[in-house]
Amino acid sequence: MAIARNDTSVLGRWWWTVDRWTLVAVTVLAVLGLLMTLSASPSVAERIGVDPLHFVRKQAVLLLPALVAMLGVSLMDPRSVRRLALMMLGGSILLLIGTLFIGAEIKGATRWVSIAGFTVQPSEFAKPAFAVVAGWLFAARRLGEPIPGYALACALYALVVGLLLLQPDVGQATVVTAIFGVQFFLAGLPMVLVILMVMGSVSALVGAYFVFPHVQSRIDRFLDPTAGDTYQIDKAREAFMNGGLFGRGPGEGIVKMSIPDSHADFVFAVAGEEFGLIACLLIVALFAFIVMRGFARVLQDNDLFAVIAATGLLVQFGLQSLINMASTLSLIPTKGMTLPFLSYGGSSLLALGIGMGMLLALTRRRLGVLS
């Protein structure tokens, strides 16, 4: 792009201050996601009796708005990002409440609501919005603003996690807890309280084992594969073994024909079979690059709000990626969570586009503090 460094237009300032490496990496992930949907979804579409390209078309239709949203949000200053996050979090909380009354139950959980013919998963939008709003509250408290930031952040965390557990969605609640814990630590939480928070989180996970039957079942199957059905995990392992180093070739995978969620939660297994270990390592490297690049930019910033909020967004992105890939590889109990940008899912794609746009906006080079 022929944009001069002395160009003071909105686009010119954006081009010379945004992290273009992260922008390129995220765009590559989004394009790879469309290719993986093209490879993994036709077999799923055939099993449910729809057109083979049904999921591909839906993903392609939403990919452009997601990228446009990312670019549009990345043009914002931190104050505008905060306002957007407040509105998005408010809407997400209302929709999370709505799922308890009008949500569609799928596989024993009510995590989706239908709006104007579109199925929306509010928790996907709540995560990045919560990271930014909590970051603002923590920063406001640390900077001495007349806002009970810690109390409000704790109340907001309890509300969001409580609504997620009522669905129930322990996985998303875990991600939000990780965001909250890391941000609270950055805001100056005393080490004693850090230890108490870690102990409380471990206790909560133990409690989830006894309270939620599906959590107990997944952990039991992880510890003892003979304790229940491990069909999808067994097929995922088979896919990785079939792929070897270089894979069977695009579209040549056979295990995807028998994995119900091959286009969503287990898309990484499809990548392993068709493109091999080398390609999977490159995908892992791409996720790691985005996270590490983001932290490198954050460490050079002097705006406390931007630092804490961007860290929360990076924790969400990195942890969600890690949970999906680790569960596909049977390193942790299975958890129904999308692989960012690679898994099929409209709500996930749009929310990630907005979230990464917020990250790009908060990590732009700034001469002064714009909070």
Image (tube, rainbow, N blue to C red):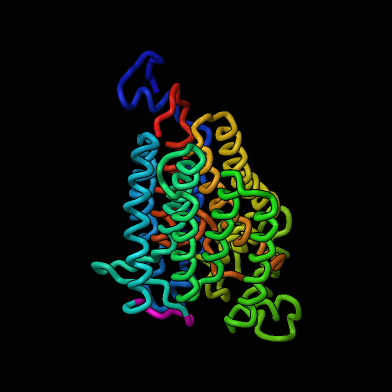
Looking at the image, is 1 positioned above or below residue 116?
above
Looking at the image, is 224 positioned above or below residue 64?
below
Residue situated furthest top in the rendering: 6
Please identify the quarter of the rendering in which residue 345 is found: bottom left
Q: Horizontal and vertical percent for residue 347?
A: 39, 60
The quadrant in which the C terminus is found is top left
Q: Is residue 104 magenta?
A: yes
Residue situated furthest bottom in the rendering: 227
Q: Is residue 249 magenta?
A: no
Judge by depth and name the residue closer to the eye, 358 or 308: 308
* Magenta segment: 103-108
Drawn side of residue 221 relative to residue 135, left or right: right
Q: Residue at x 57, y 42 (%)?
A: 290
Please identify the quarter of the rendering in which residue 114 is found: bottom left
Number of numbered discs visible in the structure rendering: 0
Residue 306 shows in the view = no
Q: Residue at x 34, y 54 (%)?
A: 88
Drawn side of residue 37 relative to residue 113, left or right: right
Residue 62 shows in the view = yes
Q: Residue at x 33, y 55 (%)?
A: 61
Looking at the image, is 256 positioned above or below residue 38?
below
Q: Horizontal and vertical percent for residue 118?
A: 30, 66
The quadrant in which the N terminus is found is top left
Q: Horizontal and vertical percent for residue 7?
A: 34, 16
Judge by depth and name the residue closer to the eye, 328 or 148: 148
Q: Residue at x 56, y 32 (%)?
A: 297
Judge by depth and name the residue closer to the eye, 224 or 151: 151
Q: Horizontal and vertical percent for residue 89?
A: 37, 56
Drawn side of residue 302 relative to residue 5, left or right: right
